[in-house]
Amino acid sequence: EIVLTQSPATLSLSPGERATLSCRASQSVSSNLAWYQHRPGHLPRLLIFDASNRAPGIPARFRGSGSGTDFTLTISSLEPEDFAVYYCQQRATGWNFGQGTKVEVK
Amino acid sequence: EVHLMQTGGGLVQPGGSLRLSCGASGFTFSTYGMAWVRQAPGQGLEWVSAITTSGDYTWYIDSVKGRFTISRDNSKNTLYLQMNSLRVEDTAIYYCAKEGGYARPFDYWGQGTLVTVSS
């Protein structure tokens, strides 16, 4: 089973700041990694697929990078609606998620 | 427009059963894999089960194997999750989710339904 470890657990930032979220896989998932945003009261929303491709309608401030075992989601300048929990998910073998990173207002 | 409408859920005693349904519209249901994902109170997203387009292959997280059964009726555009021998730790919001294609991530989600297992 591939385990995904996200860090940090919580990121406290102000609007306009840059957010850098990490996801590490216990073994290579190649580029089969996705990122989701989950805001309270909303459905999970696909942001990034294949490690670096933005899903339709996702703003350019969201950028995914990495391959193999180390991945990063970068939000270049936080908007108020970006404060949420972010999950990575691997699709190399199975469907499991990381434990999430909460981006909260500082 | 893609729409996933969930029904079912509610309060059940430990050891009881429930069936969740997920009605799909706005896309060719029979050509996409589907899955169930849950979120326990205060916890993150957890994938529960998945099924291929035809229903020939199914997968489960270890903690629900032998208790939950995923199925689909492509003639009715509906996904199901039969949950038996429910445990307190199965308490969660359950979401159905559509894959974006073979081995693709989930691009659409149902509205979620709360399952509470409690005596």
Image (cartoon, coloured by chain):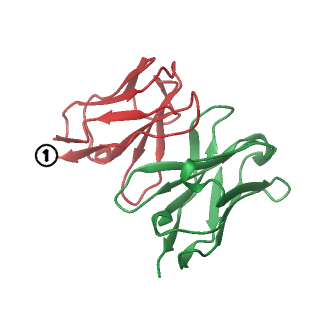
Chain colours: A red, B green
- The foreground one among B87 and A97 is B87
Residue sticking out furthest to the right? B75
Nearer to us in this view, B78 or A83: B78
Q: Residue at x 77, y 54 (%)?
A: B72
Asked whether residue A61 appears in the rendered view, the answer is no
Residue drawn 22% across the image and 30% down it: A18
Relative to A24, residue B113 above or below: below
Q: Looking at numbered disc 1 in the image, what kind of residue is underneath it? A: Lys
Residue of label 1:
A106
Q: Is any part of residue B39 visible from this angle? A: yes
Where is residue B33? Give x, y as percent.
70, 42
Which residue lies at the image location 40% right of the left edge and 43% below the top edge? A37
The image shows residue A35 at horizontal and vertical percentages of: 44, 35
Identify whether B117 is placed above or below B52. below
Judging from the image, what secondary structure is the residue with disc 1 in? loop
Q: Quadrant of residue B43?
A: bottom left
> Is A19 displayed left or right of B81 in the figure?
left
Q: Which residue is rendered at x = 33% and y = 35% of the image?
A: A6
Query: Is A48 situated above or below B27?
Result: above
Q: Chain of mark 1?
A: A
Asked if residue A43 lies left or right of residue A23, the reply is right
